[in-house]
Image (cartoon, rainbow, N blue to C red):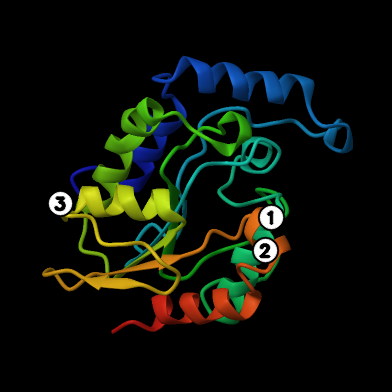
Amino acid sequence: MDLSISALNDRIVSCDRCPRLRTWCAQVARDKRRSYSDDAYWGKPVPNFGDTSAERLIVGLAPAAHGANRTGRMFTGDRSGEWLYRALHRAGAANQPNSLHIDDGLTLKNVLITAVNHCAPPDNKPFPLEVVSCHEYLELLIRGRVWKSVLCLGSIAWTEVMKTYGLRPLPEFGHGTYVDLSNGTRVIGSYHPSQQNTFTGRLTEEMLDEVVSSFISYR
């Protein structure tokens, strides 16, 4: 890569491009949720997490206010992360199924996790301009190497990844949908393991296992 994962993470953590998001993250870190009142919240942009030499990339939407914004690690400390890391563990890409805090010993094998936005947005909804402001970090990551496979959690992640690869018109998003790029990369779509999807049954663990297995095993 022209820019190492470590150097990219340093740039992400120090980013202040989106005043609304920075204010919100700091407020959440200060006020806290009662159940986490003794925790020291991260409250900053959340860096990429995983195997820095990975050939496979997972793209989420954004940190959760009391999840990664609290713990400082992608998909850690919330129910979406519980689903994702259980699936990665079953697929052999994580050494344990639990993701509780930044020092819990979790490691990933050949997988790196990033997000469209690295700051937690109110109501889990970043503004379009905030997505644009953060897009450079995704582009640097994606274009920094040829990925074997990219797993997009949700339609926004799918759209931003497709834009980065220059696909026009944008392929339609769907769970289990995939696009094979000319460079050999397979981009796979999945419903996001949000509570909105998992509580309603739109996404089941079996569905997530199937798409994660496909993502891990592709060529």
In screen coordinates, is 196 left or right of 51? right
In front here: 186 or 70? 186
In front here: 52 or 128? 128
Residue indicated by mark 3 = 166
In screen coordinates, is 48 left or right of 124? left
> Between marks 2 and 1, how big is the CA–CA gap?
5 Å
What type is the residue that disc 3 sits on? Gly
Residue at the spot 31% in from the left edge and 47% down from the top edge = 160
What type is the residue that disc 1 sits on? Gln
Residue indicated by mark 1 = 195
Residue 188: x percent and y percent?
36, 69
Residue 81 vs 20, above or below: the answer is below
- Label 2 close to label 1 by CB (< 8 Å): yes
Residue 128 vs 161, above or below: the answer is above
Determine the secondary structure under disc 1: helix
Res 209 → quadrant: bottom right
In front here: 125 or 54? 125
- Label 1 close to label 3 by CB (< 8 Å): no
What type is the residue that disc 2 sits on? Thr
> Between marks 3 and 2, how big is the CA–CA gap?
31 Å
In screen coordinates, is 197 left or right of 48? right
Q: Quarter holding the C terminus?
A: bottom left
Residue indicated by mark 2 = 198
Residue at the spot 25% in from the left edge and 70% down from the top edge = 179
